[in-house]
Amino acid sequence: MQKKMTIFRTNLRQARHSLVKRLRSPVPPDAPSPWTWSMTAAAILVLPILYFLHPYDGAILRAVSSSDMPGLWLLRDLTDVGRTLFYLLIAFCVLLWTTGKDRRTLEERQRTRIHTLESQAAFALAAVGLSAIIVYTVKFAVGRARPALIDTLGPNFIEPFRGGHLFASFPSGHSATVGAVTVILALWFPRWRLPVLLATLALAFSRIAVAAHYPTDVVAGFSIGCLTTLFLARFLANRNAGYAIDSGRLLPKRRVLAGKGRETLR
């Protein structure tokens, strides 16, 4: 047990040292900004969508949540897949496992895989966690009543800084997590970006199907998760920490150790 703890502390110290070194490294003068004009345009575009969608929040919620349309039952069963804690626990457990591995006994290929898995799990943990912090801060500041109170308070009731579960509808935390996972999976599996987007949009939509959130809650939450994760990936890419900017493209590429200290982009 003592040997395992020693290995764990050594690996943790090395990982922390490597991350701090990357984050403190100077950013090249010609490095692109982690926040782009297209990201600004996307954030601005969300505002009129929320404005024009808001008057129909109650009607859409009632129609979708009471519908027996084929496929909605599946979305209702899968809605809890978007729970923030679920992804945080997975990423944290992966980090515990990789940090506890004695890499001296592994072949070079195995060490590179462990390193890649460790860095990407840390990124996922940070992306989902940061999205959640932003969303729950906005929730508390806005204080929108949840759909459970639609018959008594209506879909437009807002009481800022009230706190409590019933007044934390806007934006959707599940949808923010799903938005973060969308970008994470798009970075990990570039060839599957369209199927990933369609699947995660359906998962975010499930929050309306179970009458947990209004449509505007879902749009806002999903947008926050996507933009926060994309910003974080580009921020790290400028510091060669797990990612690298792909010239002319919004999404960066993953940096993967290829052995002997070399890195390759995927």
Image (cartoon, rainbow, N blue to C red):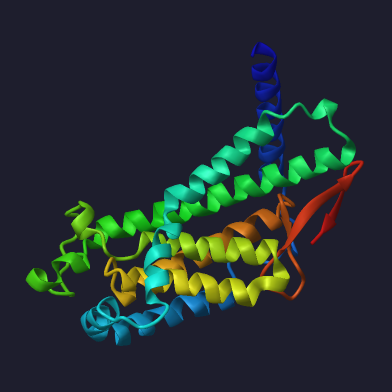
Q: Position of residue 158 (x, y in %)?
A: 17, 67
Quadrant showing the N terminus:
top right
Whether 168 is drawn above or below 196: the answer is: above
Badge count = 0
Q: Is residue 258 visible?
A: yes
Q: Residue farthest to the left?
A: 152
- What residue is drawn where x is 64% and y is 18%? 5
Q: Residue farthest to the top?
A: 2
Q: For this view, does 156 lie left or right of residue 171?
A: left
Whether 113 is drawn above or below 53: the answer is: above
Q: Foreground residue, 124 or 247? A: 124
Q: Is residue 33 visible?
A: no
Q: Position of residue 221 (x, y in %)?
A: 40, 66
Q: Position of residue 71 (x, y in %)?
A: 42, 78
Whether 58 is drawn above or below 127: the answer is: below
Q: Foreground residue, 75 or 230? A: 75
- What residue is drawn where x is 64% and y is 67%? 186
Q: For this view, does 252 lie left or right of residue 179?
A: right
Quadrant showing the C terminus:
bottom right
Q: Position of residue 95 (x, y in %)?
A: 62, 38
Q: Residue farthest to the right?
A: 260
Residue 94, image quadrant: top right
Q: Foreground residue, 236 or 1? A: 1
